[in-house]
């Protein structure tokens, strides 16, 4: 009898305890940093490995598709083949850029983000609704910034000296997503931080877990649009405003137009998508007849 009372008392104490009980994932995250030095380096290494994991594992299925004849019909530019030499050249360039440019940026991330009020070792982690909404906002903010910065990179010397490198692959494949001049990686990379910076400035809570999810979302999207494959299950078939590979692949093929990274609306609004221009032409022709 006494035992029963005791258990009930303990359960009650636990349930009403003000001390939050972290989940398994939260405990792992905390114990990785607890009482240890080099927090900045530890965090940078985790983010770097996360980046490598998402980037290369998202590319893998596309790479496998290249060896399966069945999937050929989904290739956007079937006539162009990327030789193993071209693929290797891309991998080497991307790895050098990731180690010499992105890793140092990840080192700078902790001090800067802490200053701006980002949460790192706070639990509980944000719930999935918060993470999803934040990611959607960041995606839209990045797309907006990307449209103008990318369009600027297509002007004269900026194109010749910087952006031309990214356009070396006129029939891109997933890894070509990060094949770019260092100045381009830095300028277009700013777009990644526009959303989080706005959210923080507006006093919205941002956790490093949200950032890690946003990083994965952005990487998956950018590898997808460069994949060279347009599958029937592409998001663009369900969301008309979604660009997808169909949209960005044309940009690599035609060199002009379709400057946005994710959505179609800015190109539509500013008339830099061919479909919009054709529609305008048809409208003008109709007016003449009338
Ligand atoms: C933009 O993408 C669409 C397909 O999504 C394509 O029909 C159009 O030609 C592209 N425009 C340009 C200028 O590349
Ligand atoms: Zn371009
Ligand atoms: Zn591209």
Image: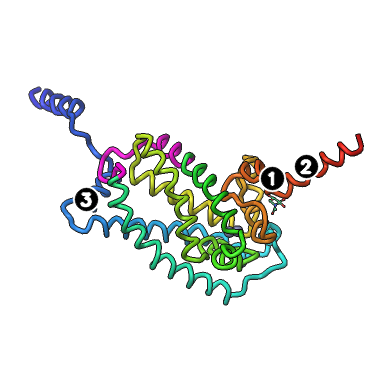
Cβ atoms under marks 1 and 3 closer than 8 Å: no
Assess whether residue 103 is covered by the magenta stretch.
no
Instruction: Give coordinates of residue 283: x percent, y percent.
Output: 82, 39
Q: How many marks?
A: 3
SS class, disc 3: helix
Cβ atoms under marks 2 and 3 closer than 8 Å: no
Q: Is residue 99 left or right of residue 280?
A: left
Query: Circle 2 is placed at which residue position?
Result: 280
Front disc: 1 or 3: 1
State how far apart marks 2 and 3 are (Cα): 60 Å
**Which label is found at residue 271?**
1
Q: Is residue 260 above or below residue 175?
A: above
State how far apart marks 1 and 2 are (Cα): 9 Å
**Which label is found at residue 31?**
3
Front disc: 2 or 3: 2
Where residue 118 sits, quadrant-wise, is top left
């Amino acid at each position: 009898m006494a035992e029963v009372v005791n258990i009930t008392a303990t359960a009650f104490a636990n349930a009403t305890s003000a001390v939050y009980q972290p989940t398994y994932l939260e405990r792992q995250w905390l114990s990785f940093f607890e009482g240890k030095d080099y927090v900045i380096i530890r965090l940078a290494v985790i983010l770097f490995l996360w980046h490598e994991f998402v980037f290369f594992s998202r590319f893998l299925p596309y790479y496998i598709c290249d060896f399966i004849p069945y999937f050929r019909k989904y290739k956007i530019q079937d006539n162009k083949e990327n030789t193993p030499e071209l693929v290797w050249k891309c991998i080497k360039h991307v790895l050098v850029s990731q180690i010499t440019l992105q890793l140092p940026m990840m080192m700078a991330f902790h001090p800067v983000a802490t200053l701006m009020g980002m949460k790192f070792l706070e639990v509980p982690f944000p719930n999935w609704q918060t993470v999803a909404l934040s990611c959607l906002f960041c995606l839209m903010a990045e797309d907006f910034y990307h449209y103008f910065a990318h369009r600027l990179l297509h002007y004269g010397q900026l194109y010749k000296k910087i952006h031309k490198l990214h356009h070396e692959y006129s029939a891109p494949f997933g890894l070509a997503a990060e094949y770019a001049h260092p100045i381009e990686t830095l300028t277009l990379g700013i777009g990644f931080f526009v959303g989080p910076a706005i959210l923080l400035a507006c006093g919205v809570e941002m956790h490093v877990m949200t950032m890690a999810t946003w990083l994965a979302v952005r990487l998956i999207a950018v590898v997808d649009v460069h994949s060279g494959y347009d599958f029937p299950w592409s998001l663009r078939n369900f969301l008309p405003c979604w660009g997808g590979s169909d949209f960005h692949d044309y940009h690599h093929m035609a060199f002009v137009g379709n400057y946005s990274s994710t959505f179609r609306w800015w190109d539509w609004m500013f008339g830099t998508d061919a479909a919009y221009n054709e529609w305008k032409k048809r409208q003008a022709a109709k007016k003449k007849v009338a």
